[in-house]
């Protein structure tokens, strides 16, 4: 299991735990890149855990934009799952502050929706990038579309 944590200044967090490949017997792009994951969240008075599937290419696709945001301290890095149960939008203000808007559904398309913003900064995002890189290495993208 690989954990990717987005930490906020006030102790709030979103932790994405990538558990395993959903179809370990598949080695094609379409089926082989599905991953089982959980999200643990603490945002203000809200706490919760949601399970879902993400894709290896989604994780890999978030790494470079987040790294660029960390380097320039401005701009936007976005992550969204194909099933739209988890979306993140990190926005830098140019001074080191990074707001991460989170939207989590407990059932894709029809479930309850939690929307929150984690007030983070460049120090925390550096750790997130390292954890994200480790997850990309552990669950590389298989094949091509």
Image (cartoon, rainbow, N blue to C red):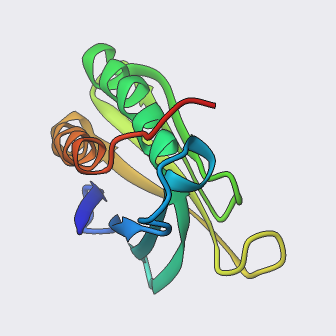
Residue 110 appears in the rendering: yes
Q: Nearer the viewer, residue 37 or 124?
A: 37
Name the spot of residue 128 as percent of width and height, x first.
24, 46
Name the spot of residue 1 as percent of width and height, x first.
23, 69
- Where 140 falls versus 119 (above or below)? above
Name the spot of residue 118 as percent of width and height, x first.
42, 56
- Where 23 falls versus 91 (above or below)? below
Q: Nearer the viewer, residue 42 or 38?
A: 38
Q: Is residue 129 left or right of residue 91?
A: left
Residue under the point 70% across and 58% down = 84
Residue under the point 41% across and 65% down = 24
Residue 43 appears in the rendering: no
Q: Is residue 86 left or right of residue 18?
A: right
- Where 31 falls versus 59 (above or below)? below
Q: Classify residue 41 by image quadrant.
A: bottom left
Q: Is residue 87 left or right of residue 25?
A: right
Name the spot of residue 35 as percent of width and height, x first.
46, 62
Q: Residue furthest top?
A: 72
Q: Classify residue 94 by image quadrant.
A: top left
Q: Quadrant of the C terminus?
A: top right
Residue under the point 76% across and 81% down = 111
Q: Is residue 35 left or right of residue 122?
A: right
Q: Nearer the viewer, residue 37 or 24?
A: 24
Residue under the point 37% across and 30% down = 66
Q: Nearer the viewer, residue 111 or 76?
A: 111
Count the numbered circles shown: 0
């Amino acid at each position: 299991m690989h954990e990717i944590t987005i930490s906020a200044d006030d102790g709030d967090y979103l932790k994405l735990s990538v558990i395993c490949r959903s179809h370990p017997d598949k080695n094609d792009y379409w089926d082989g890149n599905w991953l089982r994951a959980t999200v643990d969240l603490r945002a203000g008075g809200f706490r919760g855990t949601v399970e879902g599937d993400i894709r290896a290419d989604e994780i890999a696709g978030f790494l470079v934009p987040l790294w660029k945001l960390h380097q320039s301290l401005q701009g936007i890095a976005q992550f969204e799952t194909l099933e739209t149960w988890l979306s993140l939008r990190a926005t830098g203000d140019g001074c080191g502050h990074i707001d991460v808007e989170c939207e989590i559904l407990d059932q894709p398309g029809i479930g309850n929706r939690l929307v929150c913003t984690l007030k983070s900064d460049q120090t925390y995002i550096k750790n997130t990038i390292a954890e994200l890189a480790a997850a990309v290495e552990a669950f590389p993208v298989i094949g091509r579309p």
